[in-house]
Image (cartoon, grey):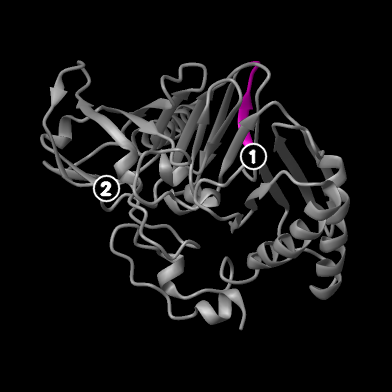
């Protein structure tokens, strides 16, 4: 009986510790207003009087300053009684919160980057899209931030969505219902490396080299399907499986593909690599032409699972999203 009581106490303390030391984010994709989404954060326990909340200035893989904090507005902080706490915006990407030991909740609104009214648009594979009831692209560095000194604690995402939406990602859902998804992520670096695309599903899955592969496609004009593109991607992966000795060094991987019509806002198209996924922003062109375009890009992006995602310098492994010390190994990561 004493052993059972001790076990109960240990488990209860562990659950309480996890709850107090986890970022818990909430957003509702049904409640979008003028391309804006409200973000609510139940904060981890803060033990200092003042704390700084950061949204990235730059993220790995882009090598360019985009100041994602400029798309954040109406930032507010509250204690457990709902009383407002003083916030001072330090610059485009940082907010200093006073009386931080009382901090319980933060709320703010986020505008998408793809059609924002700014001088220089973010390259779409690293940006965000908010189209109510049609398509939402969560490149997570554009929506979620971190407190100074607290990048390595867990994150929890709670996403309410239309029932007909599916979230394509390299993440594994902890739980899902008809209209909600819950994800847990080990730390901020893994969160940034895990984009999610919500839309009506057009997905194909297959297994190769010990890995489960997801191919997800959004195409407004339905010019091409995930089944069609998955055949090309499977051919690429078979070649890379052979090169890597018969087994792929991942358990799961997602190819997340957005096909746009008309002109690209930024003037470009391409992809951005992550540890367990890659996001593609490509023109919705005739299928045979698109196939060749995708094969060239996907072969390159997928091989980033080796470098820099598993072989990299300290600057990449412990990335500073506000004042980065850029790696000098771009020649190794991108090829020469």
Q: Which residues are magenta?
A: 173-178
> Which residue in the structure is indicated by mark 1?
172
- Nearest to the eye among marks 2 and 1: give it: 2
Taking the view exactly as shown, the residue that stands out farthest to the front is 262
Q: Earlier in the sequence, mark 2 or mark 1?
A: 2
- The answer, for residue 193, to whether it is visible in the render is no
Describe the element under mark 1 as helix, strand or loop. Answer: loop
78 and 133: which one is in front? 133
Describe the element under mark 2 as helix, strand or loop. Answer: loop
Provide the major secondary structure of the magenta segment.
Answer: strand
Which quadrant is the C terminus positioned in?
bottom right
For label 2, the crowd category at 10 Å Cα-Cα, with few meaning under 14, some 14 to 19 and many 20 or more, is many
Picture coordinates of residue 127, whole percent (x, y): 48, 46
Whether 21 is drawn above or below 93: the answer is above
Whether 99 is drawn above or below 70: the answer is above
Say if the magenta span includes residue 176.
yes
For label 1, the crowd category at 10 Å Cα-Cα, with few meaning under 14, some 14 to 19 and many 20 or more, is few
Taking the view exactly as shown, the residue that stands out farthest to the bottom is 336
- Residue at position x 38%, y 57% from top? 58
Whether 307 is drawn above or below 191: the answer is below
């Amino acid at each position: 009986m004493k052993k059972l009581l001790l076990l109960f106490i240990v488990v209860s303390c562990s659950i309480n510790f996890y709850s107090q030391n986890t970022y818990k984010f909430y957003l509702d994709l049904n409640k979008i207003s003028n391309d804006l989404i409200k973000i609510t954060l139940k904060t981890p326990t803060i033990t200092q009087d003042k704390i700084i909340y950061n949204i990235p200035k730059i993220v790995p893989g882009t090598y360019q300053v985009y100041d994602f904090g400029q798309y954040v507005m109406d930032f507010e902080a509250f204690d457990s009684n709902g009383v407002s706490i003083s916030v001072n915006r330090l610059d485009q990407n940082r907010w200093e919160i006073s009386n931080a030991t009382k901090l319980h909740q933060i709320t703010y609104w986020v505008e998408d980057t793809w059609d924002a009214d700014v001088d220089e648009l973010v390259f779409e594979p690293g940006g965000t899209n908010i189209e109510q009831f049609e398509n939402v692209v969560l490149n997570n560095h554009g929506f979620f931030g971190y407190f100074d000194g607290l990048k390595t604690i867990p994150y929890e995402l709670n996403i309410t969505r239309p029932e007909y939406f599916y979230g394509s990602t390299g993440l594994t859902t902890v739980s899902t219902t008809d209209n909600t998804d819950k994800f847990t992520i080990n730390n901020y670096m893994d969160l940034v490396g895990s984009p999610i695309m919500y839309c009506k599903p057009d997905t194909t899955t297959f297994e190769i080299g010990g890995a489960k592969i997801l191919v997800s496609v959004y195409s407004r004009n339905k010019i091409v399907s995930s089944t069609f593109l998955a055949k090309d991607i499977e051919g690429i992966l078979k070649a890379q499986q052979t090169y890597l000795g018969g087994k792929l060094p991942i358990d799961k991987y997602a190819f997340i593909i957005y096909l746009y019509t008309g002109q690209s806002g930024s003037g470009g198209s391409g992809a951005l690599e992550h540890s367990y996924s890659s996001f593609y922003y490509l023109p919705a062109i005739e299928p045979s032409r698109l196939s060749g375009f995708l094969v060239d890009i996907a072969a390159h992006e997928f091989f980033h699972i080796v470098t820099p995602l598993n072989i990299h310098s300290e600057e990449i492994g412990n990335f500073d999203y506000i004042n980065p010390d850029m790696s000098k190994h771009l020649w190794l990561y991108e090829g020469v």
